[in-house]
Structure formats: C-alpha cells, structure tokens
Image (cartoon, rainbow, N blue to C red):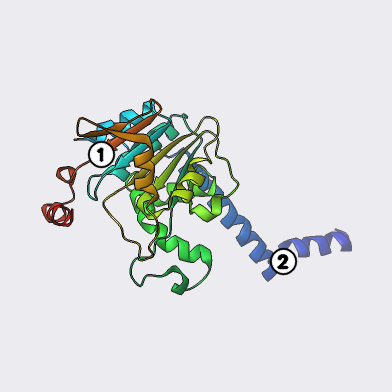
Amino acid sequence: MSKNANRIQRRGDKKPSKLEQRQQSRVLRGEVMLAEEQRTQREAYNLKWFKPVLAQPLIVQSMEERDLTIVDSPSGTGKTSTILWKALSELENGYYSHIVLIKTPTEVGTDAIGFLPNSAEDKISVHMEAMRSIFLDFMSPGKLETDIKNGKIILTIPNFVLGKTFYNSLIILEEAQTMNPETIKLLTERCGEGSRVVIAGDSKQRYSVKKREDGFRDLINRVTGDYHGQRESKYDNVGYIRMETNNNMRSSLSRFITEIYE
C-alpha cells in the first residue's frame, strides 16, 4: 500500500471533528423535524366528537349558505367552537385554503398590552392563547403549529392585515364587540374571491376599558331589522343568528351570571 493510501486510510479512520459533529447533529435534527412536520401535515383533525346542538346548527347552515354570517350570543353558548368546527371541516375538505382568525388584543382592566414583557409578537400571543386552546379541542399541538407555519391557519390582529386581501379563505372576526365600526369595515373588506366572513361577538358585552364605539352593534343595526319583534337579516347574503342565555352550556353558574348581568 502506498504512503498516500495509508494517509487516506488514516484520515478515514479519524473521528469527526467537533465542527463536523455539530453539522451532523444539525442535519439529523433537521431530518427529524421534517419527518415530524410531514407526519402532522397528514394528520386529520379531531372533529367527530363535536355535534352542533340547540341554535348551533343555524350557525353551520348560515356558514354554508351566506357570504357573511353574524353570530350574536352571550358566553358559554359554544359559538366559537361551532364556528371553528365548521371551518376546520371545510378546510379539511378543500373548500377553503386558509382559516384567518382576527382578534383585537383587548385590554381588560389593568391587563394592558403595552406593559406585558418581550416583543410585540410575544405580547399578542398572550391574547391569542384562548383562541389557540379552542383549536386544540380539534387537533394536536403539533398539527396546529404545522398549520400555522404553512399558512393554513392564520392568527392575527387588525393592525397586521392592513392592505391585505384573503382569497379562498374563511375569515373569522372574534370578540367583535371590542372593535369599532371602522375596524370591522376594514376587516370585512379584506375578503377576496372565494372567501366568506363570520363575525362573532356579544352585543350586550363590553370588556374594554377604553370607551370605543361598538362596531359589532353598529353592524347588526346596519344589516338587520325588527320583524314582528324578531331581529332578522335584511339581506339574502347575510345570515344573523342570535343565541340567548338559555343556550349557555358552560355551567348553571355561568348561565346565572349571564342572566343577572343582562
């Protein structure tokens, strides 16, 4: 064997350097992450356990038939769960390419966003946590993170959608009573071809410490009328569903609290 061959063989037997080990470790981690992402992409949503009840089927029907659906109801009625269940069903079946959930980072009492630590994204994530938890009723944490990363699910706030248009999307405005009329107008105008909008809130509920005009109630007044004591939509492409306190399924105490504050 030649001297060069001996040198090559010795180099081949050498242990990888620390740099090479780190590079190999990064490659391995990347392969594991890619495999996990591909697995979660194929993962189905957990939708079979949820069955719409009481007034909830009216939300489902309106989402199927109307360009704009307005759900006006007190807490505990399952309006958000119903909306997300239907949205994920249609996303899974390819009816939409994206679910866009828009929520104002509301300041309740002393819970001011400006005083929360870290970056703006970190501050907003605190306010989005409740929305993420509802998604997790229908999917694994890994599936949610993958769908967010791939843009299938978009969680955002009004300031971040200025100038955007969402095509083939279901756009959901959550806690709309915290938005002023100009904000609701701006957000609904983001609706492009193949998209529909669902606006959920409670016209009798106000949490914000700031005295802002109630855009949700303003919108309801614009698109509905009083017909023999019953408020109904005036437009064929707009669905309006009002769920009352007796639709509160959270608990008897929750229902009692809602009743005494109405």
Mark 1, secondary structure of its residue: strand
Q: Is residue 169 visible?
A: yes
Given residues 246 and 135, the one toward you in this image is: 246
Residues packed near mark 1 inside 10 Å, few (<14), some (14 to 19) or many (20 plus): some
Q: x%, y% of residue 207?
A: 31, 60
In the image: residue 153, left or right of residue 205: right
In the image: residue 20, left or right of residue 238: right
Quadrant in which the N terminus is drawn: bottom right
Disc 2/disc 1 C-alpha distance (Å) = 74 Å
Q: Mark 2 points at which residue?
A: 14
Given residues 143 and 191, the one toward you in this image is: 191
Q: x%, y% of residue 118?
A: 50, 72
Q: x%, y% of residue 177?
A: 35, 52
Q: Which amino acid does label 1 sit on?
A: Arg
Give the number of callouts. 2
Given residues 186 and 53, the one toward you in this image is: 186
User: Residue 242 has which mark?
Assistant: 1
Decide which of tag 2 and tag 1 comes sooner along the chain: 2
Q: Which amino acid does label 2 sit on?
A: Lys
Residue located at (12% from left, 54% from top): 256
Q: x%, y% of residue 15?
A: 68, 67
Mark 2, secondary structure of its residue: loop
